[in-house]
Image (cartoon, helix red, strand yellow):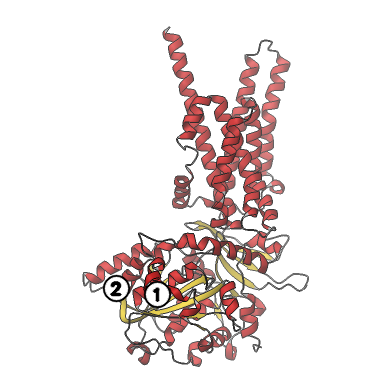
Amino acid sequence: MSTNSESATWTSARSSLSILAVSLGLSLFTTAYESSVIPLFARVPTLKYLGHVVHTSTAFALITPKLSSSKILLILGCLLLLAPHTSYWIGVHAARFKDPIYSPLVTHAFVLAPVVYFSVSLAMKVDPTLALIVLAANALQLRPLLALIFSALSLDASNNVIFAALGCVCLAVYGWIKIDGGRHSAHPSAQNTRSTVALSVIPLVFAALLSLNPALRSPTLVDSIVAPYSSPTYPLRILNSTQSKTGVVVVGEILPPADGSSTPLHSIRYLRASHSLLGGVWIGDEVATLDSFPPLTDQYGAPLGDSIYSAFVLQEAVRLVNSTPQGRKGEFNHALIIGLGTGISANAFAQHGIATTIVEIDPAVYDAARQYFGLSDPGPNNVFLQDARGWVRSRRAMVEAEDPSAIKYDVVVHDCFSGGGVPEHLFSIEFWNDLKTILSPEGVIAVNFAGKLASDSSQAVLATLLRAFGQCRAFHDHVEPISQEQFHSHFINIVFFCSPSPTPLTFRPAVKEDYLHSYLRRHILSSLDKREIRHTQIGDNSIWSAATEEKFVLTDAHNTLNTWQEGEAFEHWKLMREMVPDVSLCLLMLGNGFKFNFRKCGEQAP
């Protein structure tokens, strides 16, 4: 009796452990899959229906007939080993549909859904009752916790390793079941045993070939690289790839075609974090300066040209404000940069002799800006690699405690747009009030935002800034004039200039010294008066009535900015596919709308 009881207890414990292992493995796979396709589809489109696919596949597995455990393990192991390839190639071809809903959904259906289905089937095969309890407890949804762990440990680039490891575990268990079953069969024989062992080993050999053979590997770079990598099929060079907080931070270059053929996109060095293009500059023959002045160089002496995005230069118009005492005297002593990117604005402030403090959440972004984009050393105690919300709050506490080391800033550039949206916690009224405390009473802040003017998110950003600072003026970065219809239908960059000063904001005309020998700066800063966007052009006029304004003022307790930005994230994704060739989309996942910046404003360049 005691032996039977112990055996039953051991069987129950083994079943429980097996089901928990399957659940944990599935959550691990889903987390790795999610982070592997986000660079192609961006976070919002990727996650839109991912949960629906998981739940639908789970429900389907509960009601369909089950294969044997060994067959499920064999199929599951093969699916997992193929995941680095299927997630890449199916994702690449699905992306060519240029649909932010169906493209990721197709990828989920062909890559994620089969793994979920067979994983749940395996759990049900072990113990249907216990599996249902585990599923009901939502054990399959450990993704948020695992994603947090991945981010904290910078494991995003290890997705292929996770796929391979899970696949090998499944095939190893499959082999053990087959061998153990052969030993305990009713008619064991040496021939049957050899056949069983061979059948068990073949999948493991397949796994080794798939993982180790360069010709069979997934074309994605799965590990950090420090030596340049050149694509054998496209004029693309990856200078650096680093696992970090915001994903895999990549510095790459699109080179001129080796055969001299015409292509609309080349001679660009860019900085990317996961799906987000953080900025870039022209290189090679596209480098040109006013008066043939020596160009900026990176740490290796390579010449760097203008920014590929004009919005970063438009932010520098904060120096042109002349309605404040500092502005009239040209005495901007301290600047704060929140969101570094490639460091275009930070470098400009340094060249103008302004002491600049940088707050950037990702250390790899800062390192890339210093090494590959010519960012000068900001000096000791001027770089803070952390989330801006906590940093600004701690600085406010220092100011209120009258700490002599607490600096009040004359100008602030706030540029946190990334991958189709902005972090909502950096756009709430509480954040702006904290920031206003560390701003000089006559200081000016430049806030970059991208979207449609008619959108709720654009209205919310402006309404919240006006509530916090009292006055703002908005400008766009387009090279050519924009019609009223385009304002409301096109995805555009807007820079809001705001100040708590009681004096209405005015800007002086730009002069030669403001251009820093840059054709792009000359074009953008000298045409500032033609770029202004009136408040009434941003959304419905009713926003400015007291009855409806409360809907749009963002607070920590009531902040729907991320929800409002979903549609714009889809629009941003589609724009990227329209502007970038398919081949460079697959290799780079670059951003949109930058080629015209140099061509239009630099057409007089030698």
Is residue 303 in view from this perspective?
Answer: no
Residue in view at x 47 percent, y 79 percent: 536
Q: Give neighbour class at mark 1: few <14, some 14-19, many 20+ (Cα, 10 Å).
A: few
Q: Residue farthest to the left?
A: 401
312 lies left or right of 469: right
Q: Amino acid at mark 2?
A: Thr
471 lies left or right of 286: left
**Closer-to-camera residue (227/583):** 583
Residue in view at x 58 percent, y 30 percent: 122
Q: Amino acid at mark 1?
A: Ser
Q: Position of residue 260 (x, y in %)?
A: 77, 73
Q: Which residue is mark 2?
A: 437
Q: CA distance from mark 1 to mark 2?
A: 27 Å
Q: Which mark is residue 545?
A: 1
Q: Are marks 1 and 2 in contact (CB under 8 Å)?
A: no
Q: Which mark is residue 8?
A: none
SS at mark 1 in the image: loop
Quadrant position of residue 576: bottom right
321 lies left or right of 172: left
Quadrant position of residue 331: bottom left
Is 328 located above or below residue 194 in the figure? below
